[in-house]
Amino acid sequence: MPSWYMYISTVLLFCCTEVFTVRHARNLIWTQSPSLRIGVSRIVGIEGDPSVWVKSGEVKVRHISAPHIGWRFRGLAFQYASQTLFWTESNNKKIQGLLLNGTTETQTVFPGTSAEVDGMAVDWVSNNLYWADALYNWITMLPIGSPTAYRIIINTGLQNPHGLALYPQKGYLFWSDWGDVSKIEISDLIGNNRRVLVSTNLGHPRGLSVDYEDNKLYWVDSQKDTIECVQFNGNNRRVVVVEDHTNFFGLALYKDYLFVTEQEKGHLRIYDKNNGANHINYQLGYIPYGIIMYDESLQTGNSSGCVAYGCEHICINDALVGPTCYCGNGYKLNDTKTCELAHSSIQVGHIYAIKDAICHYPANLPDMSLQNITMDTQCFLEANRGYLALTFSAKDQTLYYSENVTNSINRVNLQQGASTEAIMRGVGCVEGMSLDWLTMNLFWTDSVYKHIMVSRADGRYQNVVIDKDLDYPLGIAVHPKRGLIFWADSGSSPKVEMSGMDGFHRRSIQNISFGSPNHVFIDFRYDMLYWSDSLLNNVKSYNIETEEISIFFSSPGTEFFGLSIYQDFLLWTSKGDMNGIHMARMDTKEKIRGILHPNVGEARDLILYDKDNQPDFESFCSSENGGCQQLCLQRSNETYFCACGVGLNWTTTGKRVILVCISTVGVLRDNFLLVTDSYQKELYQFGTFSNEVYAIPTGKHYRPIAIDYDPVREKIFWTDTNAKVIKTSGLKGEGVAVVKAFTSVSMLDGIAVDYINRLLFFTDTGLNTIEVVCLDHNDISKIIVADNLDEPRDIAAHPIDGYVYWTDWGAQPRIERSTMNGEKRETIVKLKKSSWPNGLTLDYKGRRIYWVDAKYDRIESSNFDGSNRNIILKEKDAHYFALALTGDYLYVTCWKRKYISRIHKTGGVLERVGPDSFARLNGIHSYNSSEILVGSSICQNSGCTHLCLPISVAAFVCACPDDMILKDDNKSCKPNVTMDSSGNRTSPMSYFPSTAGTKITISPKSTDMDITVKTVKQDRLHSKRGTHALNAGSISIIVIVVIVCAAIGVIAAVYFIRKRQNTIPHDKLVEDTAIDSFYRITFPDTTTRDEPTFDSGIENPAYSYDQDS
């Protein structure tokens, strides 16, 4: 054959050669697949030195054939020292490896890639495998032999990463990216020190190859039809080959030869790297993809340094500093070599609510293997609380979610062992939430109250954004850069609307039909809004800049609901028969996976938990909250608005023009209510005549609960159950002071001011005590009741009678009273076993007591002695907390309402008073100067040095603090000092139940329905028992206790068995079309698939070869 013919001809490769198996030797290896799927995919190799066979034209071809047409080989890499060939497989979506020693046993190196992984390379010095995923737009590394310790090293600024190449001795990682802005970049081997190498005059850069001898990087450009090279510093760029009407794909380099796969004609092309001469082209008859030169000379050196260093996860042997250890995703370095789980339990991924639980899947859900995946591993918060709406803060690693069962919005830090926190209750049906991560303002829709609300991320300063012309507001999304909110309304007049974050400049998206728009999603990469429509069975897109609208994706019969986008994937939830989470490719508009759970939960909101979905935009409000004291709300016209919480408006103050929130309503001195709001974290004054609200500026609160008023000094008193204090201030918020501070065990639910005798009583349901404090000398206090209390809640005092009344919602619910020193104690009302008596108030004139029952949703009353009991009101689905009497009306707070209600004290209709803009109303107290109890204290001129406690209209007793006792004169106190056995003075411990032994209990409908610590009490020091010996009575008691505990154990076991039956079943996910008890996997076109795209039991590729002699 003439020499010139060899250099310019195209040779039909398989017609001219013998075929043998690919083996461990010098080989040029590439992957190829048939265009019409009439054959199987192959890994093909030409064995020998190219310097010989390129010139002679005599080649020995070897190949590995896929077991069936469902396999598609793409990218290639190798590790010569271990005789291992690696490839990516686009239909099974995984990376596999094979020893080139004649075996047919393959190994799955990494499952769960996308279908487009073409760039892959091995760091043979550090023993790591790298690959670029063009659909997930990330670059990942994996220590060879450790499939669980993978690490995503680059996942920002990529759009279509393709080629990948390494120079381990210099610590260089190269990749090509042919997205909207094509570029070739370089970084170190862990993804740091990233910089652009080439960014101009690029089309579609694809395959890369390193010239280790000349320190150059070569690449092919499929749009420009070129092969080019550049030095590692970006200088001396050169076009080596220009070949029109080609489609270059992969590239390999050996000595002076450039080997290129070309997809337009199905060629293997060989060029000279120096002058670009085309040596020869081979017609393959298939479409070729990745290509490598498998040769020892291209992987000099070894991994002994990293092997000896002993990293637990990942080792990188840096040329300058030597071996360094790193950890895989989800782990952190414990020391210099070992790894431990990171505090954050959730990485980038997809979180969706199914009502019964909240579930999480990793970012590569569209392609991940579902083997051994169970609901227990993927779901959390399995409390069946009707989880509906989701949003998140990436910088705080916090998930926000709504509970329809408890009518609340909650948050939890996504770290192992973190506790949930309710930030507001009393909401309606919240199905959409969105967080402005720049200002930490939380927005939500409420279809019951038909409004859109905003607050700080901790629930404070709640404000109505929009409450007009909303029918069924559902999904909502914020755009902090543009100062916009978008929401969907699926009511009788369905629409998608937008406005500024303060509701200003509201407008609808026009010129498009709506069926039932549900959730909305903003793709900040392209400034595109998407919404799901379950009636029209499609997802529409809206270009926020151009206002162009289009149907982005449709699927007949699909009820699109929740919606998110990750990289090149569209994800959505559906209800009904397709209840689950589904995925489609955005480029091909093809559904690729569906995960169904038809019998469990109901798929609702879906979010993408990814910090890149919360970009670091510039905002007027992001710096010092825009100078606003409470809420800074950006508007779409590049302005912003300062807003304040309930009862406040802003005004300017100071040289820096800080917008401070103050009350625009003057403080009331008469005819008002005082209420606490534990989610707004505020105290409010409410005018009973004017219905106006005034926020009392008393500084920072944590969880204010009980409240009362001293009209003599015009002082407010309130408890804060989180801060563990009782505090006081004037009506204007002036003179804030701590009355008494408590230990972490205390839970201060009730407070009562006796302004005549200058006493303050309170309940402590943590210590199960009732205590009194001197109003004018706060350091003087005494426990008056400490025995046989279970869960004391509210308390009220009668200054003239000398009695206190309290509710107890413990195991034996009841209302009790005693004299102010704790004597003459009696149960005046016995309630049903399951009752939850909360607030109570006294009618001094009518001599009746009123109380609310949160279990049976009742308001009841009786005489002071418990007689003549009657029901004022009974209704469904309430949770009354407190009540106050003024005039003929009872004013009531309810956890399920955002407003104060009132009812005539003899019965009638419960009606709303004032605004419905509160969040969690708790304690309430009324003041009317014409109705207050007037009288003189019997303690005047009592001679008591510390406490004077009335015990009737005409009698009192002097009392001492707990660490003191009365002297013989029964008026003055002395230290309670005794002598020990050695004659030394000792002071007995003040009576406080020990916190040494504690148990965790959940209090039903307690102050915040949160887990609280309840102390296991010890006996009082001065016990009435005269001996510690066990007598017959004691033994009988012990036996009874044991029997009771056993019964409780049986009941608890039954309860937990039943509870478990109602929780999420423990079943594996299976890639199958059959329905099991939990999941079903569906495909969009199962009826037309001619071959299965999954392994179907075949794990190892078969060789197709003639035995080499």
Image (tube, rainbow, N blue to C red):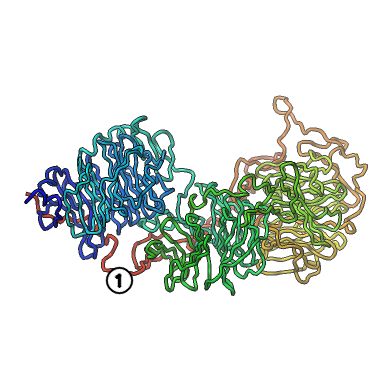
Say if 1079 sits above or below 737 in the image. below
Locate residue 247 relative to residue 1083 in the image: left or right. Answer: left
Locate residue 332 relative to residue 633 in the image: left or right. Answer: left
Disc 1, SS: loop
Locate residue 620 relative to residue 98 in the image: left or right. Answer: right
Q: Between 841 and 152, which is closer to the camera in this rendering?
A: 152
Q: Which residue is mark 1?
A: 1088
Task: State whether residue 554 appears in this view.
Answer: yes
Location of residue 522 in the rendering, given as x and y in whole percent from the top left corner: 51, 59
Task: State whether residue 413 appears in this view.
Answer: no
Location of residue 959 in the rendering, given as x and y in whole percent from the top left corner: 83, 41
Q: Between 514 and 307, which is closer to the camera in this rendering?
A: 514
Q: Amino acid at mark 1?
A: Thr
Location of residue 273 in the rendering, given as x and y in whole percent from the top left corner: 23, 43
Quadrant of residue 308 within the rendered picture:
top left
Q: Residue at x 38, y 47 (%)?
A: 200
The total number of labels drawn is 1
Location of residue 731 in the rendering, given as x and y in whole percent from the top left corner: 81, 49
Say if 975 sits above or below 516 in the image. above
Q: Between 597 and 1018, which is closer to the camera in this rendering?
A: 597
Local crowd size for mark 1, using a 10 Å CA cut-off: few (<14), some (14–19), many (≥20): few
Q: Residue at x 80, y 40 (%)?
A: 778
Q: Residue at x 84, y 56 (%)?
A: 927
Say if 835 sits above or below 610 in the image. below
Q: Between 88 and 891, which is closer to the camera in this rendering?
A: 88
Locate residue 982 relative to residue 664 in the image: left or right. Answer: left
